Image (tube, helix red, strand yellow):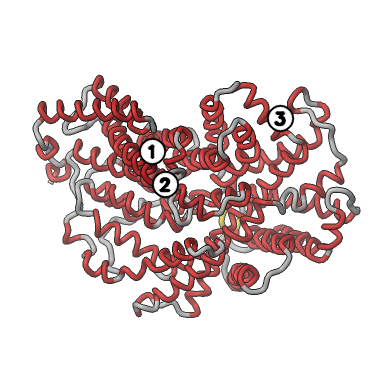
Amino acid sequence: MPPMSATPPATGAPETPSELEFSGAQRKLAGWEKTLFYWLCVGYTAFHLIVLNVWPIDSLALRAVHLGGGSVIGFAFFAWHVGAARGRIPWHDWVLMAVAAACAGYVVVELEGLQFRAGALYTPADFVVGLIGTALVLEFSRRLAGLALTMIAGAFLLYGFVGPWLPGVLYHKGYPIGFLFTYIFSDQGIFGVTLEVSSTFIIMFTAFAAFLTKSKAGDYFNYLAVALVGWARGGPAKVAVVSGILFGSISGSSVANVVASGSVTIPMMRRVGYDRATAGAIEATSSAGGQITPPVMGAGAFIMAEVTGIPYSTIALSAVIPCLLFYIACYAHCDLHAVRNGLRGVPRNELPALAPMLKQIYMLAPVIVLIVAFVMGYSGFRAALLGMFGALIASWLDARYRMGPRAVLDALELATKDCLQLVAVCAAAGIIVGIIALTGIGGRFSSLVLAIAGQSQALALVFTMIVVTILGMGMPTTAAYAIAAAVVAPGLIRMGIPPLVAHMFIFYYAVLSAITPPVAVASFAAASMARADPWKTSWIAVKLGLATFIVPFMFFASPALIGQGGWLEIANVSLSAAFGVFMLACSTEGWLNGPLPMALRAALFASAIGLIHPEDISTVIGAAVALSIWGYQRWRHGPSPGDKIPSPVLAAR
C-alpha cells in the first residue's frame, strides 16, 4: 500500500488507545521483563485459541485462567498510579501478580468442590480466596478501566452489607460476609456471564482484529477509504466516515478507531480548512459508530447475545439498517459542512491511486470469511478463527506484508494487550451483576421504572436513555451496557417491549455515551489528537450523531428498522428513514441547496422526524414539507449555490 502524505499527529497527543482510554500509567518494560511478558501475552491468547477450538476445558476453569492470567499481565503493564516508576516492575506488583495467580489456581484445583458448595456452603479457604480475589479485581479494574467503574462496583459491594439498614426499595435482608464474598467470587458474580463472554467471544475477536492489524488489512481499509473519497468535496471528513465503517467494523472500540484513523484523517481535515473542533468531532462520531457496525460490533453486543439467548448473527443483522442510517447522516453532515464553508478535497495526485488499491481487494477476504462463517451458522469464536486464517492467507498474497512466524506471535501478543481492559471491565461488571441478582435490587428497580412511567413505554425509554447515558459518562461502553441490561432491561421487557428492541436500545445509548458530554471518551480522544477544545468537540459530535440519538426510539416504534418484519415493510421504512436522516442533517447544518433561515430549519427538522417515524401519514407529510422547502431553496438560490463559495484554503494561498 502506498505511503500517505499526511501530517503526523499533534505533538504531545496520545497515540495509542491505552493512553487515551485506560486510566492507569502504562509501563514500558525492558530487558528480561519485556521478554517474559511478551511470551506470557503470546501464551495467553494462544491458550484461548486452543481451548475454544481444539481442546475444551471446564468453563469455570477457563474463566479463572482468563481472569488470573489477565490480572498478572495487567499488573505488570500498568502501574498503580500515574506518578509511579514506569521502567521496572516493583516488588509489590510482583506480589499482586503472585496472589492473582494463586487465586486463579485455587479455583482450578478446587473446581469440583466449589461447584458442589456453590450458593450453599463455603470453607474458610473459599472465603479468604473470595475476599482477596474480589479486592484484586477492584484494583485491576481501577488501573485499567478507571476509578468510576471501580467506585460503582465497590458501592454495589457495600450495598450487599448495608442493605438491611436501608429504606424502601433499597432494603434487603443482608448476608454473612463469608457467604457474600464466596458468592461474588463465583460463577454467579465475577466468573459469571460477563466474564464468560470476555473469555470466549471478546478474546477471539480481539485476536481477529490483531491479525488484521499485523496483516496490514486494517491499514488497507484506511487507505482504501482515502483513495475512494479523499478527492471529493470535504474529502478528508468523508474518509473518516468511510474508514469508520471499514475499520470500525473489525475493531469494536471507539477510542481504538479514533487512534487508528484519526492520525491520518484529522491532519488531512485541518489541511483543507476544517477547524480543530469539527475535525475532531467528525472523527469521534465516525469512530463511535464502529461499535454498532457489523460484523464485529462492540463487546456489549456479545454480552447481549449471552444474556438474551439471541444468536450474535441475528443481533449483527439487526444492526445493519441503524448502522447505515448513522453513517448516511455522518456523510451528509460532512458534505453539507464542506459545501457551506467552501471546503475542497485533497488533490488526486497526493492520494493513493485507486486502481492499485482495487487490485489488493483480497485484503477484504478476512471480513468476508467472517461474514460467510456467520451465515453458515458457525459459532462466533469459530468464525473469528476462520477470519484469522483468512488474514494470514491474504497477507501471503503480497510479499511486502507476508505474515511469518514472528508476525503471528506479535499478533497474539497484541491481542492480549488489547483485551486487558475488557477483561477488567467484565470482571468488575460481574461484581455488580452478582449483587443485583443476589439482593433482587434489579427487579425492584424495574418495578420502580414501571411505577414512574405508568403504562407509557415511551416514557420508560426516555428514563432508560437518561440512566444509560449517565452510566456511560464514567465507564466504558461494555460496563455501561452490562449494568443497564441487568437493572433496566427486565422492566422494559415486562412492559411488553421485545427483548431484542430493549437490549438494542440500551446498547445504542451506551455506545453514544462515548460522544456525549460532559464525559465523552471518544470525543476527548479526538480533541486531544486535534488539539481542540474537548467540550466544543463533544457538542459538535452530538450534532453529527443526532440521528442515532433519535433512531433507537424509531426502531421501538417499528421493529422493521432492525430487520423485524417483511421485506417490503423493511425496505419502505428504511428508505423513508434514510431520507429523514439526510433532512435532519440539512436542518442541523442549516443548508439545503443554500443557507436555511431559522424558520425553515425548524420546519425541516419537524419533517425529518416525520420521515424517520415509521407511520404512513407522518412520512407523507414529512416528505411533502421537505420537498417544498427544497423547491423553494432551489428557486431562491439556483441549482448549485455551493459552487460560488470560495475555498478558505485556496484564498489563503
What residue is pinned by disc 3?
A: 444
Name the spot of residue 143 as percent of width and height, x first: 62, 50
What residue is pinned by disc 2?
A: 289
Question: Depth-wise, is mark 2 or mark 3 nearer the camera?
Answer: 3
Name the spot of residue 297 as percent of width and height, x first: 48, 52
Question: Depth-wise, is mark 1 or mark 3 nearer the camera?
Answer: 3
Name the spot of residue 284 as percent of width and height, x first: 40, 45
Establish if 69 lies above or below 592. Answer: below
Name the spot of residue 147 as percent of width and height, x first: 62, 42
**Amino acid, disc 2:** Gly
Q: Are marks 2 and 1 in contact (CB under 8 Å)?
A: yes
Q: Is residue 236 left or right of residue 652?
A: right
Question: Considering the image in quadrants, where does the N terminus appear?
Answer: bottom left
Establish if 112 lies above or below 536. Answer: below
**Amino acid, disc 3:** Arg
Q: Assess disc 1: are there few (<14), some (14-19) or many (≥20) residues with their C-alpha within 10 Å of its C-alpha.
A: many
State whether residue 609 appears in this view.
Answer: yes
Q: Kindly report the distance in space between the C-alpha atoms of the residues bearing marks 1 and 3.
A: 33 Å
**Amino acid, disc 1:** Gly
Q: Which mark is residue 545?
A: 1
Q: Kindly report the distance in space between the C-alpha atoms of the residues bearing marks 2 and 3.
A: 33 Å
Q: Is residue 461 left or right of residue 246?
A: right
User: Quick one: label 2 or label 3, which is nearer the N terminus?
Assistant: 2
